[in-house]
Amino acid sequence: MEKTYLQKIEETASYIKDKIGVMPDTAVILGTGLGDLVNHISDARELDYKTIPNFPVSTVEGHSGKLIFGQLGGRYVMAMQGRFHYYEGYDMKEVTFPVRVMKALGVEKLFVSNAAGGMNKEFEVGDIMVITDHINLFPENPLRGKNYNELGPRFPAMTEPYSLKLISLADSIAEEKGIRLMHGVYVGTAGPTFETPAEYEYFRIIGGDAVGMSTVPEVIVANHAGLTVFGVSVITDLGGKDIKEVPSHEEVQKAALKAQPVMTALIKEMMARI
Ligand code: HPA
């Protein structure tokens, strides 16, 4: 008989527990711009996605797929190096499967990062934006379909999708370290196209500050599962009706790399203080 979604989550979680032993209460999804964080994880133990039962395998250029367990800023964490994007063809259950597994492992706090295009006129390339809220413009909600009450409620509230407490901690650290830390609303779209000038403008008018192709599905599932979430974007390009620069994958990677040391310092310090 085919395994149910719940059985798959349980099977994957018990495989990981058997391999690793002690489980962390904090997880980090390393998007573009935070990849370097893994080099700051000490006593690291890794599991390749390929070896984990039921785990999808990451395909995008610049992303490798591993779970890494170890110490970061004095805290025992698990990090996901490489995430599953909807534009790659994964369905929403696959995109968000790792978040379900994290919860089954005992994770309570989830940190997510990504690269995003800025619409807010105050933003500059290389800025770091704490995600205060999001707008889901993916064509599908990851919770569509059968609800498993064991995993969370049918109609979950999304009133504080990103923890106000963690946002305020990030602000304090930024002030101490002299980091220019912006706040904003992240618009999540399916991609893989970047936006037309009119689309960037539209996203700005509806209340968005930055747009990207990830994060929202994982954060919806994390909220459903009762996790506390912190999200951060690196602004890798700017879009709007007067902006002529053409974003490219290479430019996005380049800008994200530049912001990386600051992102890493911020997250590492947060780990030490939560
Ligand atoms: N749009 C969508 N996704 C992105 C962008 C963008 O401008 N930049 C980085 N990821």
Image: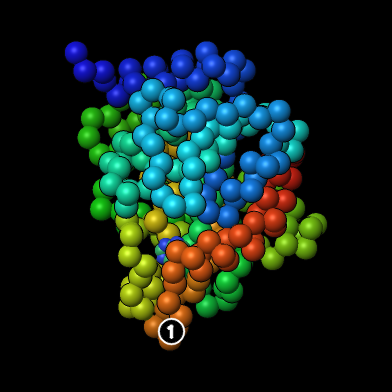
**Which quarter of the rendering shows the N terminus?**
top left
Would you say 98 lies left or right of 273 here? left
129 w.r.t. 69: above or below: below
Mark 1 lies on a secondary structure that is loop
Residue 220 visible? The answer is no
Front one among 147 and 49: 49
Mark 1 nearby-residue class (10 Å; few <14, some 14–19, many ≥20): few
Whole-percent x, y for residue 11 in the image: 39, 17
Residue drawn 52% across and 78% down? 121
Residue drawn 65% across and 45% down? 37
Residue 56 visible? The answer is yes
Residue drawn 25% across and 53% down? 139
Would you say 243 lies left or right of 69 here? left
Whole-percent x, y for residue 195 in the image: 35, 70
Q: Name the residue under label 1.
A: 244
Whole-percent x, y for residue 32 in the image: 53, 54
Give ligand 1's quarter of the image: bottom left
